[in-house]
Amino acid sequence: MSLLMTSAPTRPAAYDTAAGEGRAPLLRRPVIGVTTQTLHAIEGIPAGLPDSWVMNQRYFRAVTAVGGAPVMLPLFDDDLATVRAVYERLDGLLIPGGVDMQPATYGEATRPEVGRLDPARDTVEIQLVRWAIADGMPVLGLCRGAQVINVASGGSLWQDIPAQLGTTLIHDCYPTRGFARDHLAHPVALAAGSRLEALLDAPSVQVNSMHHQSVKTLGDGLLISAVAPDGVVEAVEGTGDAFVVGVQWHPEVFDAEDPTTRPIFEAFVAASIEYGERRAA
Ligand SMILES: [Mn+2]
């Protein structure tokens, strides 16, 4: 018998790390649904390419780095029964960054500063977030994802921070202003007693910033857990026991070990494990 045959199967180091010291190894990795975007909603995509749903790999890698098993969610806005059937297999929901939401989703007319749109994505993500919040399924929203959590909860957005808020702080660092994706643009103050403050274990952190929109009126069942020095809302979270966190910045850009990245994904995946176990019980 060869040594190879008798060796334990190799697992990625991150898989063991996710279990944590003193904790039992994960028997079942939580399935994290990651929404996608319509390929042609992205600027510069040749019209001849077939209709496709795509998403930046960083989101998937940030999930696997802490033990989650990500799956891509198709945007069947014309077939929500199929979206529901897939949703019911999930343990957690991740809403990544992307293009602007249609202002009609929060009852406003569209200002000229609003950028590219992805109506199918709006429909599917709003529905998924509402289902997840109703069921207590963990939800993590990043950038656009934080805005989706707010709009799905009945809140609204500033359609364009420079035009409507007149702040001198630059939030649209990439790509508009030419900074790198990992440029630490500004600090955010974390609300005392919030889940995010507990996770990041600091009164404030430096974050990157790639957005020209932000939360205007807060949705039901949410609280503001991070604010930029100019008052722009930088994070929201659920007021209940379930893990519902949306941050306006992009933690997935940084290394999985980054102290402002890992705790967010780790807590999200841990909550997803618990949700999956509760649901299976
Ligand atoms: Mn910002």
Image (cartoon, rainbow, N blue to C red):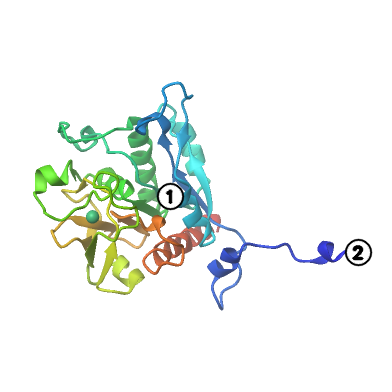
**Where the N terminus falls, by quadrant?**
bottom right
Q: So how many labels did they put on this image? A: 2
- Labels 2, 1: front one: 2
Image position, residue 121 (x, y; %): 37, 35
Label 2: which secondary element: loop
Which one is nearer the viewer's eye here, 170 or 223?
Answer: 170
Residue 93 marker? 1
Left or right: 207, with 169 as reference point: right
Q: The disc labelled 2 sits on which kind of residue? A: Met
Q: The disc labelled 1 sits on which kind of residue? A: Leu
Label 1: which secondary element: strand
State which image quarter holds ligand 1.
bottom left
Image position, residue 225 (x, y; %): 24, 62
Left or right: 108, with 206 as reference point: left
Dot 1 alpha-carbon crowd within 10 angstroms: few under 14, some 14 to 19, many 20 or more = many
Which one is nearer the viewer's eye here, 148 or 45?
Answer: 45
Q: Quadrant of residue 262?
A: bottom left
Which one is nearer the viewer's eye here, 65 or 245?
Answer: 65
Image position, residue 48 (x, y; %): 45, 21
Residue 1 marker? 2
**Where the C terminus falls, by quadrant?**
bottom right
Q: Residue at x 15, y 63 (%)?
A: 229
Work out which residue is located at the far bottom of the displayed protein and give it.
Answer: 22
Work out which residue is located at the far top of the displayed protein and give it.
Answer: 48
Image position, residue 63 (x, y; %): 49, 56
The mark that comes first in sequence, 2 or 1, is 2
Dot 2 alpha-carbon crowd within 10 angstroms: few under 14, some 14 to 19, many 20 or more = few
Q: Quadrant of residue 11?
A: bottom right
Residue 8 marker? none
> Looking at the image, is 232 positioned above or below residue 87?
below
